[in-house]
Amino acid sequence: LRHNASESEIASAASGSSSSLPVDMVRGYQRMPYVDRARVLTALLVGTSQTEDVKGAAILGGCLSAIDASFSGFVQALSNKQVRPDDINAQEMACLCVEMYGGIARASEMCQPERIPQFLTPSLNPLSGLMTFYSQDLVICESLLRFFRDYAELFVPMLTREQCLALFSASAELLKGYSAHHCSSRVIKHCVKSSAQADLEEEQSYNDVLCALQLLIHLGTKDFIDVCTIEGAGQVESSQVTDVIFFGLQQILPLMTSGLLQFPTLCTQYFSLVGFMMDTYPEKVCTLPFDLFNALLESLLFGMSHADVFVSKSSLFGIGGLAREHLKTQVLAGHLSVHNGIFDNCARRLLQEVVFQGIIWDRLEPAGFALLPLAAVDVNKFASSVNEMSHQLGSVEKQERLKVAFQRLIQPDVIAKVASGGYEGRINRLKFKKAFEEFVREVHSFLVTK
């Protein structure tokens, strides 16, 4: 029953129930926000889920059947062009249907919760298809993303292989439709007011982006769950999990500008996703098209000097992971043949924006272990970059002290081991960590940064 339902629709709903309801009661239900109706539905599903409760089973089945029938009729009307997507009644119906499906997805505490995936799986593709019609409507768009996020978070561990693949496919189509509109038309507007309340309100206007990031994070947990469980019917090949996450990441990356990364919650969730991908699948990151790879790399360079330690460490580990992966497999040779300054730029910015700054102390170890493979990629270019930076110091004495400090830190035998994929293990890490800390203390004793 839509908010804008007519009097005849209200009367029909009142008389159509198994026990006739007072019209005023139906009007009261009509006035309830869709979000509250979804909460009521969740409570009903959980409360009536006892299998031995015949009356409860009838209520549960009736709720699900009514929602399925209404949604199927609505989707068919849209597909047959019997209603226009921009019609106010169609928009209200879309809002209502998605919120009610969200209420179903949040009923994970019911008895025999596997009944929820059995009911929802056939509807996933039609639900993701709504993004084609309503990607410009942020209310419906966010509701769709929130539904898929909640369903993935609560039910991924119990899905069968077929149910997982259906969720992955629908999620990919959802994010594709979302990206097609928002990556080209979304404009970040900063409030003139600088109060904390204004900043919070502004960040909340990007909840749809946050839901998309969280959806990908929850989908990624399927790979971890399958690795940690014995072989069974619910397992999905690791490549299928990574493919959908990388596809989704490619859809979202154009949205993740430095402006959006200023928002703390969005920033943390984005680097949670990117940190997981860089740590687990660096070889897949390196095969992204250059525009997307460069956008990802720029976000890591932005994050390494971030005030949030989690963000900075995730970024530094990611940069180091890229360099180590290239040393092992030369996977970035194609990008480097056209853009040969990728690693030089990373090393220079790492030194200037992190190592030579006061912020280095809470990210000392990841900064050191990002610098080491960057230097090993091409030690001659790294030495040239150090010479260029030393010439900017002015004082000949400081120039020499900086060069000597680098020579002490970047030992040829260490670089050779790193370049060949070695220099791993706890003892070597402790040794380099100590050497890097001494290097930083030495450099900071004479190097004044602004």
Image (cartoon, rainbow, N blue to C red):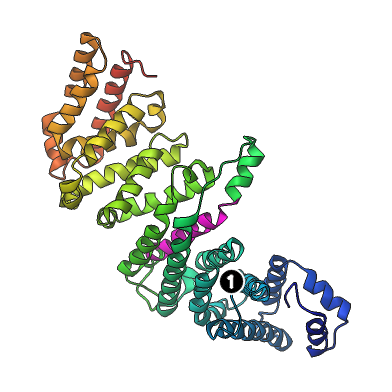
Q: Which of 9 and 249 is in front in this view?
A: 9
- Say which residue appears at 20% left-offset and 10% top-offset: 396
Quadrant assignment for the N terminus: bottom right
Q: Main secondary structure of the magenta part?
A: helix
The image quarter containing residue 249 is: bottom left
Q: What element carries label 1?
A: helix
The kind of residue tagged 1 is: Ala
User: Is 408 on the left-hand or right-hand side of 139?
Assistant: left
- Say which residue appears at 53% left-offset and 83% top-offset: 79
Quadrant assignment for the C terminus: top left
The residue segment tinted magenta is 205-224
Q: Nearer the viewer, residue 234 or 145?
A: 145
User: Is 137 on the left-hand or right-hand side of 17?
Assistant: left
**Magenta span contains residue 218:** yes
User: Is 59 on the left-hand or right-hand side of 340?
Assistant: right
Above or below — where is 420 with respect to 176?
above
| Residue 421 percent coordinates (x, y) | 16, 45
Above or below — where is 367 with respect to 338?
above
The image quarter containing residue 24 is: bottom right
Q: Name the residue under label 1.
A: 105
| Residue 138 percent coordinates (x, y) | 58, 61
| Residue 340 percent coordinates (x, y) | 18, 42
User: Is 185 on the left-hand or right-hand side of 224?
Assistant: right
